Image (cartoon, rainbow, N blue to C red):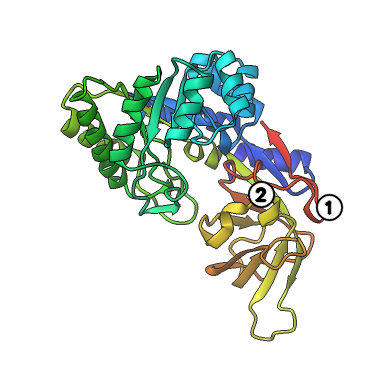
Amino acid sequence: MNSKISQYLTKHQPSTPCLIVDLDIVDHNYQQLSQTLPFADIYYAIKANPALPILKRLVAMNAFFDAASWEEVQLCLDAGAPPSHISFGNTVKKVSAIQAASQANVEMYVFDSIEEMQKIAKHAPGAKVYCRLTVDNLGADWPLSGKFGTTTEHAIELLLEAQKSGLNPYGVSFHVGSQQTDPKAYSLAIEKAALVFRALAEQNIHLQMINLGGGFPIHYREDIPKLNEFETEIQKSLHHHFNNNFPRIILEPGRAIVGNAGVISTEVILSSKRGKENGPRWVYLDIGRFGGLAETEGEAIRYQITTEYDGSDTDPVILAGPSCDGVDVLYQKSNYQLPLQLSAGDRVALLSTGAYVSTYCSTSFNGFPPLEEHYI
């Protein structure tokens, strides 16, 4: 845990569960991405954490934004982002949302089906559109390939139809999966995008943009590749397929900007072997899967946990949330060990929880209120 958050917790002792986010780390992460990948425009994926202090900090740095709903578009506008810096990046949008975004002068929209493209043509005529491709998500801890995207062949047909419908066929996008740990995943996806570019150029349609999506990993418990390893693979693939004349490149990081900026402080409700002499010991926290830790489903995202007793004797534990729901178990197979001294009333910290936590929490499942949020 960084010293700024640690000092805040010591001084204020906020009630648990709570999320504390260090905005200076958000700033640092954005700057690092911009410097390591200077050829790309950074569109922050708002869904990772849409808190106004984060958006205002990024607006001040002239960032771009990827919005998944009209409500997220409105949040960006309220934070001071110009409409030209916002991409409506959900392939499934309500008609009313397209209408509202168009009236607000948002220019760029994604689609992956003829029906969605027709909605955009009708309610945001003349808009820049890009088609999302389905790509391999191997190497990602949180895959996203099943619900979104289409084939390269269908994307070519859709973009041709988009031009006929009065839209501006602007480019293609893909997402290699969240918490992607294989840099080569981007190379394989860029190869698919290049096929679409070449096919449309033969039809005298010259696409201008590739949206590489997000996916850059952060450190939880396991080692991950360094950011410059991803930069190397992306640059190599772009130069291979587009020589020195590659199109505008967009990135949509969310986790990589806010993930390691946040810490959850949570209280132990119970620590017990529940009458089983050989264990395992169950540790129940006052936050669980319904309180914001949805990414522990399948034990996909494995947060690092620290306690005041670190360095003392430990034993294996199963970690669970507080609700009366049998699936509210965080970790049972991922070999977590916690200090034997840990008991009810102790506070523990879950590190790198700045992304995909605050917005996942339920409003009052079992009567538990949403976790408090502190931005410092």
* Left or right: 373, with 42 as reference point: right
Can residue 63 be seen in this snapshot? no
Residue at 54 percent across and 20 percent down: it is 123
Quadrant position of the C terminus in the picture: top right
Q: What element does badge 2 sit on?
A: loop
First in sequence: mark 2 or mark 1? 2
Q: Amino acid at mark 2?
A: Gly
Q: Amino acid at mark 1?
A: Gly
Q: What element does badge 1 sit on?
A: helix
Up/down of 189 relative to 42, above or below: below
Up/down of 272 relative to 372, above or below: below
Tell me the distance, in whole angstroms, between the alpha carbons under discs 2 and 1: 14 Å
Residue at 48 percent across and 35 percent down: it is 91
Mark 2 near mark 1, Cβ–Cβ under 8 Å? no
Residue reaching furthest to the bottom: 277
Can residue 165 be seen in this snapshot? yes
Residue 9 in the image: state x and y as whole percent.
71, 42
| Residue designated by label 2 | 292
| Residue designated by label 1 | 367
